[in-house]
Image: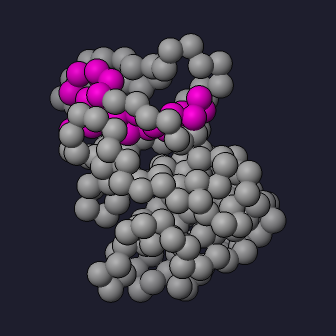
Amino acid sequence: MQTGFDPATGELQWKWSTKGSRMLSPAAVYPVKANGKIFVVTPERKSYAIDAATGRQVWSAPGGRESIALSADGSRIFVKNMFSRMHAFSTEGDTANEIWRRFVEGQGYEIAPTPCASTVVDGRELIFMPTDKGNLFCLDAADGSTIWIHKVSVALINSIVVLPDRELLLCTMDGVVTRLRY
């Protein structure tokens, strides 16, 4: 369930939830916001756009389940699913506009809910996609193609922090903390 609160009073403004998914775990749904909408991916393998002011569902689309990231300029969301796919959707408009969908070679069956991250380097936007097997994929945000893969650990990557000067800070479930220069 997603909820909206009045920022001045803290009063509940709206509630939104999926229709009866037995797999929904609020602890593993990370919303992002752009263009007056909140975007989430949920365990029933869908991506959703919700009007941030009213809680009205704007659109839903197949694809998703595991994690999401917002582009640096807020114009797209990047959605990872559990079957070696990454999707890019526009954050504009009232319909699900899928910009691209890409098979990610080497990802395999994937269940890490960790949010992806994005940044712009030398005019090129990059997406950092974590996995439950400790691999970090760097994808080109323009088309989802793989730029590089780095093995961090054998365990799920549970956080990615983009640092200045082309560095990332990563943590994994087995206690590995990595500062990675790319």
Q: Nearer the viewer, residue 35 or 27?
A: 35
Position of residue 39 relative to residue 83, above or below, is: above
Instruction: Look at the image and give the residue range highlighted in magenta.
Output: 36-58
Residue 177, quarter of the rendered image: bottom right
Q: Is residue 81 left or right of residue 55?
A: right
Position of residue 56 relative to residue 182, above or below, is: above
Q: Residue at x 35, y 78 (%)?
A: 124
* Residue 159 locus on image (x, y percent): 58, 59
- In the image as oriented, which residue stretches furthest toward the left? 8
Residue 66, quarter of the rendered image: top right
Q: Residue at x 30, y 49 (%)?
A: 90
Q: Residue at x 40, y 31 (%)?
A: 60
* Residue 145 locus on image (x, y percent): 51, 71
- Residue 39, magenta (yes or no): yes
Magenta span: helix, strand or loop, mainly?
strand
Position of residue 26 relative to residue 84, above or below, is: above
Q: Is residue 29 left or right of residue 56?
A: right
Q: How many marks?
A: 0
